[in-house]
Amino acid sequence: MRDIVNAVVSGEAGREDFAALAVPGTYRAITLHKSETGLFSGLATRDKDPRESVHLDEVPVPELGPGEALVAVMASSVNYNTVWSSLFEPLPTFGFLERYATRSPLARRHDLPYHVIGSDLAGVVLRTGPGVNAWHPGDEVVAHCLSVELESSDGHDDTMLDPEQRIWGYETNFGGLAEIALVKSNQLMPKPRHLTWEEAASPGLVASTAYRQLVSRNGAGMKQGDNVLIWGAGGGLGSYATQFALAGGANPICVVSSDQKADICRKMGAEAVIDRTAEDYRFWKDEHHQDPREWKRFGKRIRELTGGEDVDIVFEHPGRETFGASVYVTRKGGTIVTCASTSGYNHEYDNRYLWMSLKKIVGSHFANYREAWEANRLISKAKIHPTLSKVYALEETGQALYEVHRNRHHGKVGILALAPREGLGVRDHELRAEHLDAINRFRTPALAHA
Ligand code: NAP
């Protein structure tokens, strides 16, 4: 592994040098163990501790199949899907691996007693399988997390509609929180050359998701001037949705839960910010009943910030706790676009406010290759910036997951895999220098822990 790291860090090794490097037989990886899926039974979600369920193991390098690539992972990042997998919620991920294994002899590789998790990476291609022509050993890459088979016609209009669509490192094995990862070559994209490894690894999943959800015709199809209500605007998805809104000439109304996160949104350029804790919205009177007066109070506050207008788009992901309010505050004909249900997936809303006002609820999930590519292209052109707040070593992944589970983070949390330290991997120093102020402004400090 040391030769690989030296070759990458030197920045001088070429294609032939990488092709000549031996791929080790084993690598270090963050894993979940199939034997431990009952670890947290009986505990409330909040009390489940990812530090107990994730392991750092030495595992064999998987066999490389057609259309695939082995990548030396320099850095990865924490996504909420990894929090879910580490809590074995809503289901242990081993069921996904077992089901995938029934598809083909090659897919059987994924069904193991351990699951290497993680859905982001920045690194260097080590080997490519038969049929891969677009990528070569030595290519510096990031990987998006859409794994598709495309043997059915269904996925050929929008690859997210492939019946065999899976999220790599969540519904497949050999993910990115590791020193080596196995991906399909059509997950690869060029690494933004002005970013460090850990910066480049951090936007992938959330930026692509936010791009589809907010900007793409497959999502809300945001246009100039739209008022966009963004829940969790200081979090992973929200910090990119805020940037896409600003870069696309829309008007983000950012919702956050602290002063510090409100400041962070303002530093990104947002003017309208709602601190949901300070303003103490209580959309639920009790576990079963919502309070429409609180929806109204929230809507009134939005109008104060927009000069009397309602929102064209709600960027939804908290789910049960906020969905009733989201449907209520959307303008007539507007769109609530949802990709998640962090606080519960049985949503309740008053349907009169939907049908009478001709609103739409749109479901959105990750992104197709083209959408991920477009999000990455904007990052490569320094029009969208990584919102990395804190970086952990691979062996500290459990702690990193714990912080995200407890909502004690801001933006994205990075993980160093093979990169020996932060700050390495910048190839285009000129572009970085040109945008250094913005890069530093978006790389906000980690939240002080309570
Ligand atoms: P994150 O970094 O934790 O950010 C989410 C933010 O939402 C939090 O920082 C919090 O911000 C806010 N929030 C959480 N619970 C809330 C509640 N009950 N009411 C209002 N706001 C709340 O997570 P993320 O990466 O943005 O992901 C968010 C969700 O989307 C997760 O459930 C994740 O699994 C899902 N997701 C889905 C996809 C997909 O493709 N379908 C992709 C990415 C993520 P404040 O406390 O500051 O308000």
Image (spheres, rainbow, N blue to C red):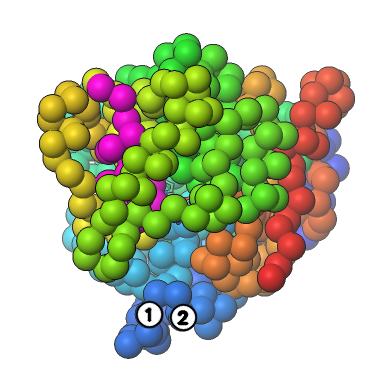
Q: Is residue 328 magenta?
A: yes
Disc 1 crowd, CA 10 A, few/some/many (<14, 14-19, 20+): few
The image position of residue 34, as x and y in percent, is: 36, 79
Asked if marks 1 and 2 touch (Cβ < 8 Å), the reply is yes
Residue 241 against residue 259 in the figure, above or below: above
Specify whether residue 86 is in view. Answer: yes
Q: Is residue 341 left or right of residue 237?
A: left
Q: Nearer the viewer, residue 107 or 66?
A: 107
Q: Amino acid at mark 2?
A: Asp
Q: Nearer the viewer, residue 414 or 120?
A: 414
The image position of residue 38, as x and y in percent, is: 34, 85
Quarter of image, res 385: top right
Q: Is residue 91 magenta?
A: no
The image position of residue 383, as x and y in percent, is: 65, 21
- The magenta-colored residue range is 317-332
Q: Residue at x 58, y 37 (%)?
A: 273
- What residue would you read off at disc 2? 47
- What residue would you read off at disc 1? 44
Asked which secondary structure carries label 1, the reply is loop
Disc 2 crowd, CA 10 A, few/some/many (<14, 14-19, 20+): few
Residue 180 against residue 199 in the figure, above or below: below
Q: Is residue 408 left or right of residue 340?
A: right
Q: Is residue 115 left or right of residue 338?
A: right
User: Alpha-carbon distance for marks 1 and 2?
Assistant: 5 Å
Q: Residue at x 26, y 56 (%)?
A: 290
Specify whether residue 128 is in view. Answer: no
